[in-house]
């Protein structure tokens, strides 16, 4: 029996659409199809541990069907769902070298395009670590007919909506259309995403830093100084911070969004623009974090201000609690500041008080 008000994602989408009298329902329809794909991906991800029974990718399962890699399956599900939606004229995906045009009659003139990473962190699948789907929705620039590459090479400032699904201890869908960020947890017993985290605002400050420190020898001196700063014992600024790095951007981002923290994937030797993709990971996450009161920079400009020149371009990213992003920017802009200096601590103390970390 339902004992208290439960807002399903479907009901929420309808409520949100009503706020815009001129809304045609196309964005709502697009979101519904992304949700459908997410439920199918969730079902398959949750079976990943049974690969020995169900067959590994590249083999045939008991019913003779080819078992595909989960990231390929996720890519296919999203492409199919978006194509049949009739509200999307094409997609660009981390899994596909070029963009995909939907030239079927009901889709070819649709208003929106979608960029997505179908299964981010997929290398973690076989060790049962949280992974995710990341998506960003733009209005097409071309007016009608087959979408073009220019429709996809838009800065994050043009995003209409962005979100992610995290397949973790529970499955959550978090999305924003630019104002509020809302989180919905999947209730498997009814197959519905239910509003569990209304109007998420990320803490102004935090005590979690996320970076792959094994690349220390490849980072710039300024990045290493900030990482050293995070480790200095200093009661006033509640340091040392806690290092948390899962190696799955969606999982690291989501934890920091809720608890406060900073996720960093800087430029480094061998990755002159960092590793993460602007269109499929960085821009959607930057859109979400800014709507939640956070910040996202490449180290030289806001991620959302980057004008993409190619589909798969990478960009450095420092994203999370605004005061922590400002603090790392302080180190990036002041090469002579020592990690243990009073100057560095004073810069931090100008910020909001740091939240205690719980767990
Ligand atoms: P590294 C996963 O492969 C991914 O794209 C992100 O989800 C994650 O944050 C990053 O790469 C991890 O990269 O080099 O630390 O293994």
Image (spheres, rainbow, N blue to C red):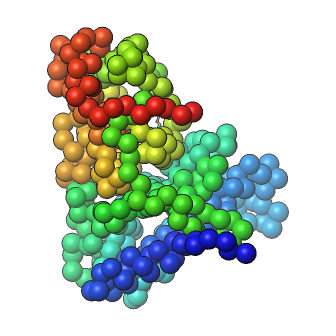
Q: Name the outermost residue toward the bottom.
A: 105
Residue 90 picture quarter: bottom left
Question: At 51% across and 36% down in the image, what residue appears?
Answer: 247
| Percent coordinates x, y for residue 183 in the rendering | 48, 59
The answer to whether residue 23 is above or below residue 240 is below
Seen in the image, is 43 located left or right of residue 71? right
The answer to whether residue 9 is above or below residue 245 is below
Question: At 21% across and 45% down in the image, what residue appears?
Answer: 302
Q: Is residue 71 visible?
A: no
The answer to whether residue 1 is above or below residue 153 is below
Seen in the image, is 21 located left or right of residue 211? left
Q: Quadrant of the C terminus?
A: top right
Residue 336 picture quarter: top left
Question: At 24% across and 51% down in the image, what residue appears?
Answer: 304
| Percent coordinates x, y for residue 351 in the rendering | 26, 32
Residue 187 picture quarter: bottom right
Q: Quadrant of the N terminus?
A: bottom right
């Amino acid at each position: 029996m339902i004992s208290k008000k439960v807002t399903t994602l479907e009901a929420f989408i309808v409520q949100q659409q009503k706020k815009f009298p001129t809304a045609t329902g196309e964005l709502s329809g697009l979101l519904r199809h992304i949700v459908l794909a997410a439920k199918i991906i969730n079902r398959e991800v949750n079976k990943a541990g049974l690969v020995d029974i169900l067959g590994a990718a590249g083999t045939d399962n008991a019913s003779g069907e080819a078992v595909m890699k989960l990231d390929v399956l996720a890519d296919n599900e999203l492409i199919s769902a978006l194509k049949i939606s009739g509200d999307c004229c094409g997609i660009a995906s981390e899994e596909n070298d070029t963009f995909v045009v939907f030239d079927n009659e009901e889709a070819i003139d649709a208003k929106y395009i979608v960029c997505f990473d179908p299964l981010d962190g997929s290398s973690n699948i076989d060790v049962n670590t949280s992974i995710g789907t990341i998506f960003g929705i733009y209005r097409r620039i071309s007016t009608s007919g087959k979408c073009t590459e220019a429709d996809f090479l838009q800065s994050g400032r043009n995003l209409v909506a962005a979100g992610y699904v995290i397949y973790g201890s529970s499955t959550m869908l978090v999305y924003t259309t630019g104002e509020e960020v809302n989180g919905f947890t999947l209730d498997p017993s009814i197959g519905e995403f239910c509003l569990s985290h209304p109007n998420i605002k990320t803490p102004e400050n935090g005590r979690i830093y996320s970076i792959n420190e094994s690349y220390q020898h490849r980072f710039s001196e300024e990045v290493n100084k900030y990482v050293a700063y995070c480790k200095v014992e200093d009661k006033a600024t509640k340091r040392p911070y806690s290092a948390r790095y899962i190696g799955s951007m969606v999982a690291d981002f989501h934890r920091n969004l809720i608890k406060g923290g900073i996720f960093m994937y800087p430029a480094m030797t061998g990755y002159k623009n960092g590793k993460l993709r602007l269109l499929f990971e960085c821009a959607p996450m930057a859109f979400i974090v800014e709507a939640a009161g956070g910040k996202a920079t490449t180290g030289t400009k806001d991620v959302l201000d980057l004008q993409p020149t190619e589909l798969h371009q990478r960009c450095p990213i420092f994203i999370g609690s605004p005061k922590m992003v400002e603090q790392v920017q302080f180190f990036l802009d002041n090469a002579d500041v020592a990690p243990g200096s009073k100057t560095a601590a004073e810069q931090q103390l100008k910020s909001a008080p740091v939240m205690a970390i719980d767990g």
